[in-house]
Image (cartoon, coloured by chain):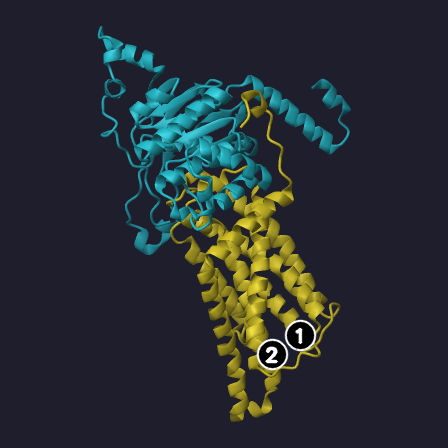
Chain colours: A cyan, B yellow
Amino acid sequence: MGRDWVMTSSGEFQAAAIVSWAEAAARTSPPLRVTGVVKSFGGGFDPTRALPWRRNAKREVPRRVVDDVSFEIRRGEIFGVIGANGSGKSTLIRMISTLLLPDAGEVHVFGLDAVRDSMRVRSLINRVSADPSFFRTMTALENLLFFGRVYGLTPGEVKEKAPEILRRLGFEWERALEPMSHLSRGQQQKVAVARSFLTSPSLMLLDEPTTGLDPRSKRDVQGFVREVQRDHDASILLTTHDMEEAELLCDRIAFISGGRIVAEGTPLELRQKVAGGRPVEQIDMEDVFMELTGRSVEEDEIVEPVTVGA
Amino acid sequence: MVGLAEQLRFPARPGRHALVWAFIERQTNLWKRYWAWEVVWLVYGVVNTLAVTLIANQVDQSSVGQSIDVSRLVLFLLIGTLVWAFLSAVLDDISLVISWERWEGTIEHTLMAPVERWLHLSGMVLFGIMHATVRTLIIFAIALPFFSVHLGQADWFAATVVLLVGSFSVAGLAIFAGILPMLYPERGQQMSMMIQAFVLLVSGVYYEVGVLPAWLRMFSYVSPATYILDGIRSAIIDGDSLIDVWQQLAALAAFGVVLIPGGLATFAAAERWAKKTGRLKRQG
């Protein structure tokens, strides 16, 4: 590194040295470190209240959706964040994805600050969300070409890698030439998984990737995630409210409830926390969640406010 | 896929032209898929051009027409409608930068991609200009046989340069308009359309800006469309050369210098605010 800096004489060379430094730092940093992150929605400045007919409108009360969350993902592990719909999982994922700024705390991806160095963080991550989110009238291939290109892949690379990934997900390549709107929900989600893994992200964010899938599609996606982790040592953050899936895929799990992490550990460690003398193999994760959070996944529902009147 | 050791090398940054092209190609694919809407806008454009320009023919047949150069009026209105067809297409395509993503549900995936926003917007601007050019040329080709106009004096080169330079200043305005759907997910697009309507009113599309009330005419000076229309009409109707239209070109260049960097900076500030308030998501 030192020699790189001494030899620097042009802007271009200097930039190369900075990238090398960042790479070196990234190699010694955990894939993801979330420290004391807080996020609230609502209650901010509302200019529409200046309008005469809005003066008496009910003021929105700010609500903390993510509350002092801290955790760290180790290299090559699948870390699960388990909680009900509205418990803050997706908000957390959106902050890591650089789409949302935390009110407090920090998110570091391979040592890079997700707020200050968002562009470099984006090149290291990718995401699968519960909703496949595609250009519906474009074909699966056109979608993959677009999303591949914006991550720096050439059309040739996309056409070389995509069929193999889709085959492993149990998706017939011929259907990639059909508009997304012609594909079933399960098939769309497989294309979404392929879109994300196509770019070989160093950190993969899987936000309820199997929600709403039929059992076979769910098995295909779960099998693929395990295969990628096993063969490619990938680091993955998985959010889900499916206890069975969490136990099947995750090396470590954090329970999130009301925006707070209430417990963290391996599935075995979490069971041991609530065992109270019972054999751990007799305790299922749903019971562990209920005992540690005081409620079931189904009843722990908080809905993130939708911006109205904007 | 690659192993972890390889993954920890930062991916090579793709060339800027490749990123810009990604957005042009995507918009072209969407344009092809939504071809029925394109036909609707094309028919609307042709009908609007004919309906407005035919007013000049009526003037020709009425008594008030005797003291009017009707041929000039036809050309005046024809240029106005065609240039507006072009500018409104550019304004639409660029100002929809966020709305497209929301409609399709891709906003989060597109905006988290490692693409600098100015490259993203450049792709949308270039697509908008190409799209508007194709649509306007088709409208022009269909509408022209309806009128007897003399175009021998026209300086097409000067007109093209004015339109090209003007396109970029209008692009700057459209970037400003594109911010609104990001800040106001439910009503932002309507606000953008109101800006477009106001530009139509004050820029002298169908009449000289001199007929506007004085207080409204003030706005015509700060609308780039005014200078585009003025420059193109001078070049086509009066046969003015590039040197003759330098004032309009200088004004348009000045607008571009102010509006494009200003639009990009404001877009960046708005995106940061949207990230703070959680507006960068599919449902508002």
Q: Which numbered tag is attached to residue B236? A: 1
Q: Secondary structure at mark 1?
A: helix
Dot 2 or dot 1: first in sequence order is 2
Task: Locate residue A218 relative to residue A202 in the image: left or right.
Answer: left
Considering depth in this image, is A211 or A295 the residue closer to the camera?
A: A211
Residue B237 occupies which quadrant of the picture? bottom right
Q: Secondary structure at mark 2?
A: helix
| Type of amino acid under label 2 | Leu
Task: Locate residue A146 relative to residue B149 in the image: left or right.
Answer: left
What residue lies at 24% left-to-right and 14% top-to-bottom?
A283
In the rendered image, which residue does mark 2 sit on? B75
Q: Which chain does the numbered disc 1 sit on?
A: B
What residue lies at 41% left-to-right and 34% top-to-bottom?
A170
Q: Residues within 10 Å of mark 2 (few under 14, many from 20)?
A: many
Quadrant, the C terminus of chain B: top left
| Type of amino acid under label 1 | Ile
x, y percentage for residue B173? 55, 56
Q: Which chain does the numbered disc 2 sit on?
A: B
